Every structure is written in C-alpha cells, then in structure tokens.
Amino acid sequence: MKIAVCVKRVPDMDIRFRIGTDSVSVDEAGLKFDINDFDAWAVEAALQLRDKNPGSEVTVISLGPDVVQETIRKALSMGVDRGVQLKADKVPFDGLAIAKALSEELKSGGFDLIFFGKMSPDSSNGVVGPMVAELLGLPCVTAISSLEIADGKGKAKRELEGAQEIVEFPLPAVLTVDEGLNTARLPSLKGIMAAKKKPLEVRAAQLPPPQLTVRKLELPAERKAGRVVGEGASAVPELVKLLQTEAKVL
Amino acid sequence: MANVFAYVETRGGDVRKVGLEAVTAARQLADKFAAEVHALLLGPPGIGAKAAQIAQYGADSVIVVENAALTNYNPEVATATAAERIKSGGYRAAIFSTSAQGRDLAPRVAARLGVSIVTDVLSFEVEGDAIVVRHPMNIGKVIATIAMTTTPAVIAMRPNVISPAQNAKAGRVENAQPAVDPGSTRVKVIETKQGSREKLDLAEAPVVIAGGRGLKAAENFKLVEDLASAFGNAAVGATRAVTDDGWRPHSDQIGQTGRLVSPQLYIAVGISGAVQHLAGMRTSKTIVAVNKDKDAPIFKVADYGIVGDVFEVIPALTQAVREAKKHH
C-alpha cells in the first residue's frame, strides 16, 4: 500500500497567547511547537497499516516554512519512510488554499490511503481533509475512531453526538482521525538516528491566493471573577439560591 | 436577489436542534439584506412533514428531498444535493452547523463550490460586500475576526451559540430528488448506533454535569448521573483523564481534543481545571465547581464554587435540586 499522512506543526496550547504587533497573527516568541496530536494519531494509523502489509510505504507531507522540517523529522523518527515539505512562507488560515496545494502534491502520488488529523487546535477549522478528498474526487470518512482495512475496502467508526456511525468505503480514500483510534508511538533512539538519513524532499507549495482575510485576532474577554460560595455540603442551600435568583438556571 | 441557504440536519427521520439553529442563523443573516431563507431538508419518506416546523423558524422555502435510503446521513448524497442547490440558487451565503455531520459535510460542499469556509462560527455581521465572522482559534484562547468575500460565504455555526427562534415565514414546499442515486455512493453508512433516546447529547443539553479524577473510581460517576437526573435536562461529560482511564467512553470527553460544550449551566465535579478541559467548556453561561482543593484552577473560571468533598456535596446538591424542581 502507498499511504500519505498530512501533518501540521502546531504550538503547545498550555500557554497564555499574545497577539503579534501586526494584530492578525499570534506572537510566536516563547511558544513550543510539536506535531498536532490528531496528526500523530494519523501517522500511527498509517504505520500500523504499513507494518501489516509488507511492501507498503508511508509518506508524510507538511506545508509551511523550513521549521516544519522538524515536524516531518518527528514523523520520520516514528517510522515514516519519506517526507515532503511543501514550502511556503506561512500557513494560511484559508483551508481551501491549503487543500489545493496539498492536492497538487497528492494527485499523482498513487496513494491508497491519505490520512489527516480531524483538525488542528491552532486554526481550529477542521476542513482540509474533506476538502482534499473533494478536490481529488476520493471517498472520505471524517473523524474515525476505529479502522479496519482488508481486500481494498475499509470499515470505520465515527462518533456522532450521542451515537456512532459504522461506515464502509472503497480504496483509495481520504480518512481524518479522531482521538481514540490509537496511541501514537514515541520515537525510539534508533528511529531518531534513522530519520536523519531518510529522504526529505522540498518543493514550493502551489498556494492559490486566499479567499479569507483575517482582519484581527483578539484575546477573549476574561470571565468575571467567580466566588466561592462556601465550604462543604452546608454551602449547598446558598448555591441553589444563587442558581435560582442570580444565574436563573434552576 | 441573493438569498440565504440553510442545511437542516436530520438523523433517523428527526430534525436535530442544530438544524433549527442553522435556519435561525440564516433568518438573522437574510434579514440583514431583506432576502429569503431557503432550507434543504433531506431524510426518509415522511420528513416532508417537518417542513411546517422549518417554516416556523423562518424558512421562506423548504426544499424537501425524501428517499428511503436517507434515514442515515449519506455524505455523498448530501454533498451533491446541497452543492447543486446552492449553485443553482445563486445564494449569498450557505449556513451549516459545526456538528459531527456538519463538520463532515460543509467543507466538502464548499470545496465542490470552489469557495472557502469558516467553521465553529460564533457570530456574523454584514459589512459592505463582506460577511464578517468571529471564529475561535487556539482552543478558544484567541478569537479571530475573518472577512468572507466569496459568493456564497459558507459558514458552519458553532452549536448552541444561536437559540432556535420562531419567526414564521411561508415555507413554500418544493419536493426534489437527491442529486445522486443514494444506492450508488462509494461511502456507505451501514449502521447508526443510537445512544439511549432519553440520553441528551452533550452539545445540546441545557445543563452539563462533568466528572473528573476527583470521583476516584468509575462507579462513583453514579453521583454525577444522579445529579443529572435530578435536573432532568442534563447530559453527563468527563475529563480526558477519566476517558483515558476508561471510566467513561471517549465520546464523553469535554476538552481540546473532545467535545465543545456551551450549556446554560455547567457543573464541574472533582475537576481540577486543566487547560485542555477548560478549552471545551469555558464558554458555558454559568459554571459551578465543586472540588476539595481550594487552589484548583477550575475556581478561576467558575461563577460559583464550593470547596469540599464531592462525596458529601454532590448528594446534598442532588437532593436540593430535586426539591427545587418539585416546587416548580
């Protein structure tokens, strides 16, 4: 099987963000970056399939400036066979522009499966995977939490609100990965050494002009400071009174 | 005249609340430029009976597509049908929901139309030629204001930010066919395993009670479930620590990698308030926290807190809520 995984470098979210001086980007000073969690699970899914199907190959693709090579190397150190950087000055917010650039790279690759994380926490738009599927005319299943592949067909589970869908699809296909599908392996020391020798091709991203304009970024209004009503079960009557008379939710 | 399109989400032959929210959002947008709302309703035979309800929420026209194979969501039929209708209708905007179905469908429709999309939209304004939307980024720690100038502007609303509001319109019914044969699609939903009917969904419940590690063991979630049943309109959620430990299914996880909820009332039971959890619930209207650690970060976002042992406080609260509900 030929498998592609599209991955994104994202900042660690456990920080108070600052808005850059241009007011339309996040100040990157002091941020720690790593592969998007959902994308790491996508890489893991691809590696598990490769290992079950001898002769398979996994390619990881990331769009962005040269710093995304770190993210590609991370995937290579997990066991991915080769990497492609689609070089761009920055990653645009516009998911269609990204999807078009990725589709240009993916369309002639002869991939049986193309994996994405279901979303990235930074742009939080979650549209690139299904858009690529549509641009390539491929079947697509989003946000999968289980996967079986056999005889050129796949079966996956998706979590809905209060329900689950069981979905069947033919290959080639595009899949986006939700939490719960697997636990991503950590790179081994051997993997890290091996990754240095694996091929990493760099090509210019064919990004069309974006159709969306980010006008400004802001920090959300802080919640007004709350109060501790009291301690222990004796505080319950006061809480109930506040929920009835002040918050009016009971 | 450029009208506004709304996709009415259905499941198992029922209109979902997010479907009514999409119609309400479309109505609010259409009223800004004196346009009509045209709603697309896909479902099994009999779904057309819901057209009157859709009209109540502001649809001038309801396009009804009934097909026995559409009891379950069919992504390829929904994509082709919505894209074809939006294209032929020349709409100014198309409104979807950022539900599981909407997240799957709306980007495909936008790609087929060759236009961009913004999901998880909190609010929108019309400014000249642009529709300007607000969209949370970085797990809600940054809010982006984004101008959409394409036609149509494809917008997927965050669930629960717009309450379905009645605003009755004519609701002319137009019966139509699926744009592709549901029997011929490549991706097939072969089964939808519906959770218990009585169980409210996290994203739609007006009250959410969530439990964390402070509950100490899976079986102690009964305290949370009892409190939810005392409210009667509550859903039960959990933190990532709890779902990772297998106390609750992954689908119950509220947080950065799980579900986003914005209920009227959120009660955090034995939850410390890790940043990954706060990302999923900080937009709740009223937040209550019960935790024995007075320094737990959850108290920074809670409107009302009780410092105490959840095994004492929650049963007392359950009893008090039962009493309060009885007197209503």
Image (cartoon, rainbow, N blue to C red):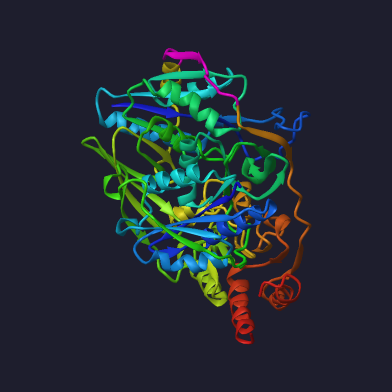
- Front residue (pair B277, A95): A95
Q: From the image, which quarter does the C terminus of chain B lie in?
A: bottom right
Number of numbered discs visible in the structure rendering: 0
The residue shown at (45%, 53%) is B250
- Front residue (pair B141, B218): B141
Which of the 4 image quarters holds residue B56? bottom right
Q: Residue furthest bottom?
A: B327
Q: Main secondary structure of the magenta part?
A: loop
Query: Left or right: A150 with respect to A177?
Result: left
User: Residue B84 at what x, y percent from top left?
Assistant: 44, 44
Which of the 4 image quarters holds residue A148? top left
Query: Left or right: A186 with respect to A110?
Result: right
User: Residue B239 at what x, y percent from top left?
Assistant: 54, 54
User: Residue B238 at what x, y percent from top left?
Assistant: 53, 58
The residue shown at (57%, 53%) is B260
Is the residue B142 above or below the residue A213 in the image?
Answer: below
Asked if residue B265 shows in the view, the reply is yes
Is the residue B68 above or below the residue B56 in the image?
Answer: above
Query: Left or right: A235 with respect to A199?
Result: right
Asked if residue A189 shows in the view, the reply is no
Magenta segment, which residues?
A196-209
- Front residue (pair A51, B137): B137
Query: Left or right: B110 with respect to B274?
Result: left
Is A63 colored magenta in this rendering? no
Is A203 colored magenta in this rendering? yes
Is the residue B204 above or below the residue B129 in the image?
Answer: below
Q: Residue furthest left?
A: A151
User: Residue B188 at what x, y percent from top left?
Assistant: 30, 48
